Amino acid sequence: MWLEDFIPSESWADAWPKSSEVSEKFKEAVKKAGAWIKRVQKDEKKARKFDLLLAQFLTQIIRNPKYDFLLDDLFKTLDSGYSSNFLLWILSLVYLPISDKIRELSSKNLIEFDYVKTFEKVNFDDNNLDESIKNRINFWLEDIIDIISIEYSSLQISQIKTLFLKREEYNQLLIFSSLVFEFFFEELNIEISQKKSQNYIDFIMQQVYTKIQTLESEEV
């Protein structure tokens, strides 16, 4: 299986049902996904496992209008230079099939997330957060080390570290990750402010950066 198997063509987009539910961002996302995949092909003769996986999941995600608001910043973050496995990890918080794949590859049990959301929207309260939600986020943090360790690349780790130290690239990472974080809680009918989400994500990413430094020194 090769990356071209996942390149969305114009005919592929045109074949999609014409309805008011399909946003204009869909066709734009198809073009961006195709351009990104072709760029990967130029960089490497043989597609890496996680480039393939991201391409595969992208063709699924862009078909669902509820993810439309994530697409622009997803592609901006890709363009910043963050690797496919890193982007897969971020998306795995709101797209369970990615989480399942990560844990399958790392030979871990799949996540069983059994939180029952309330009918009425509630405000985020970090002092009174349901245990199942805490566990879900902890598993998410656990998955980042797994996904970059499965096919370890010191060059890739070095690239991620460099991007963390570049203000513009890191800020783009925070914007995209914060949107994902907010969306995760929105799906649970929990409202979290943009500022609080960004603060949490900034803290999480600093923890990730520390873990990545340790991982590189150990050279898994």
Image (spheres, helix red, strand yellow):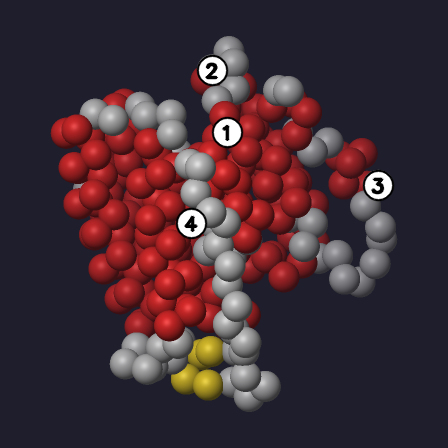
Q: Is 102 situated left or right of 11 in this image?
A: left
Residue 51: which disc? 1
Dot 2, crowdedness within 10 Å: few (<14), some or many (≥20)? few
Few, some or many residues within 10 Å of mark 3 (<14, 14–19, 20+): few
Q: Report the quarter where the N terminus lies.
A: top right
- Could you tell me which secondary element the residue under label 4 belongs to? helix
Give the labeled residue for mark 2.
44
Residue at mark 1 to residue at mark 2: CA–CA distance: 10 Å
Q: Which residue is mark 4?
A: 90
**Which residue, as the protein is rendered here, is positioned at the far bottom?**
120
Mark 1 and mark 4 residues within 8 Å of each other at the beta carbon: no
Give the mark, 2 or 4, whose residue is nearer the N terminus.
Answer: 2
What residue is shown at x 31% (from left), y 40% (from top)? 145
The disc label shown at residue 15, or none:
3
Sequence-earlier tag: 1 or 2: 2
Q: Amino acid at mark 2?
A: Glu
In the displayed image of the protein, which residue is found farthest to the top?
Answer: 45
Q: SS for tag 3?
A: loop
In the image, 75 versus 60, the foreground residue is: 60
Mark 4 neighbour density, 10 Å: few (under 14) some (14–19) many (20 or more): many
Residue 175, how many percent across, how many down?
37, 57
The numbered dot on residue 167 is none
Of helix, strand and loop, which one carries label 2? Answer: loop
